[in-house]
Amino acid sequence: MSRTAPLSDVLVFTRTTAYRHNSIPAGRAALRELGEEHGFAVETSEDPSVFTDASLARRGAVVFLSTSGEVLTPDGQRALRQWILADGGFMGIHSAACTEYDWPFYGELLGARFAGHPEFQPGTVLVEDRGHPATRHLPPRWDWHDEWYDFRSNPRRPGVRVLATVDESGYEGGGMGTDHPLVWCKESGAGRSFYTSLGHADGAYRDPAFRGHLLGGLRWAAGWSRDDD
């Protein structure tokens, strides 16, 4: 099922208290441009006070774009958790997996936590599920440059829909073995969570295939495009 109303208002949060990616401005610009092209408003912020019940009530989705470290206040955590469980849509991009290590709910929401990565290098994304709006436009084997994130645990488990993995034989330094998920989504209460580990470099956000990947994930998280429509 999908919402009948279009995606209308997206909050893109980019606060960092640890490593800060230089690609954050490019990511913000890409999401704003997608909003302009597809008819939804994008607000960007690094102010944790934006996470209130009133602010979140009008959001179609919340995006953590390469956030890092502890970025929310206790009140903000409470508001975000309540909103997601009640039908909110969350999308995490790249180092969103390096965020809120001390908040158990966030780890459950995202599905896995960052462990490390080798150097930025080419590799091959294996698109496992092409029925999802974030991946249906991608080829089965997608050549890409990125930081190939390892995670503390494999997110593949009941209730998690893995969309893409990486072929560790195609790059140096992989640490998860033959099953290495990169992109997945899951239900969280009445809400939805989509995560992509891709998006380290500026150039990713200018790439049409990657922009389509973000748009599809955002639409799914917001509940606008959840099936094979």
Image (cartoon, helix red, strand yellow):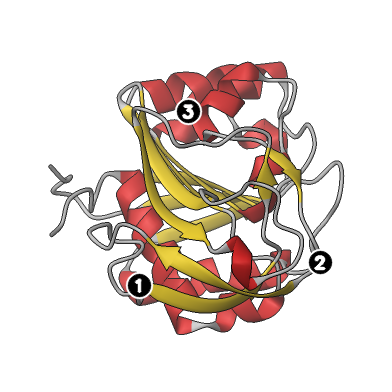
Disc 1 + disc 3, Cβ < 8 Å: no
Q: Secondary structure at mark 1?
A: loop
Disc 2 + disc 1, Cβ < 8 Å: no
Q: Secondary structure at mark 2?
A: loop
Nearest to the observer: residue 190 or residue 52: 190
Residue 153 makes an appearance in the image: yes
| Three-letter amino acid code of the residue under disc 3 | Ala
Does residue 198 sit above or below 82 in this rendering?
below
How far is mark 3 from mark 2, CA to CA? Answer: 42 Å
Query: Residue 208 lies in what quarter of the image?
Result: bottom left
Earlier sequence position, callout 2 versus callout 1? 2
Q: Point out residue 131 in the picture as x, y percentages from the top left corner.
A: 22, 59
Residue 59 makes an appearance in the image: no
Which residue lies at the image location 59% right of the left edge and 31% below the top edge?
51
Earlier sequence position, callout 1 versus callout 3? 3
Which residue lies at the image location 83% right of the left edge and 55% below the top edge?
20
Crowd tier of the residue under label 1, counting other residues whose Cα lies within 10 Å: few below 14, some 14–19, many 20 or above: some
How far is mark 2 from mark 1, CA to CA? Answer: 24 Å
Does residue 47 sit above or below 31 in this rendering?
above
Question: Which numbered dot is residue 119?
Answer: 2
Looking at the rendered image, the disc whose residue lies closer to the viewer, 1 or 3, is 1
| Three-letter amino acid code of the residue under disc 2 | Glu
Query: Residue 113 lies in what quarter of the image?
Result: top right
Disc 3 + disc 2, Cβ < 8 Å: no
Which residue carries the number 3 mark? 54
Which residue carries the number 1 mark? 140
Q: Point out residue 27 in the picture as x, y percentages from the top left corner.
A: 62, 67
Does residue 201 sit above or below 228 in this rendering?
below
Left or right relative to 178: residue 40: left
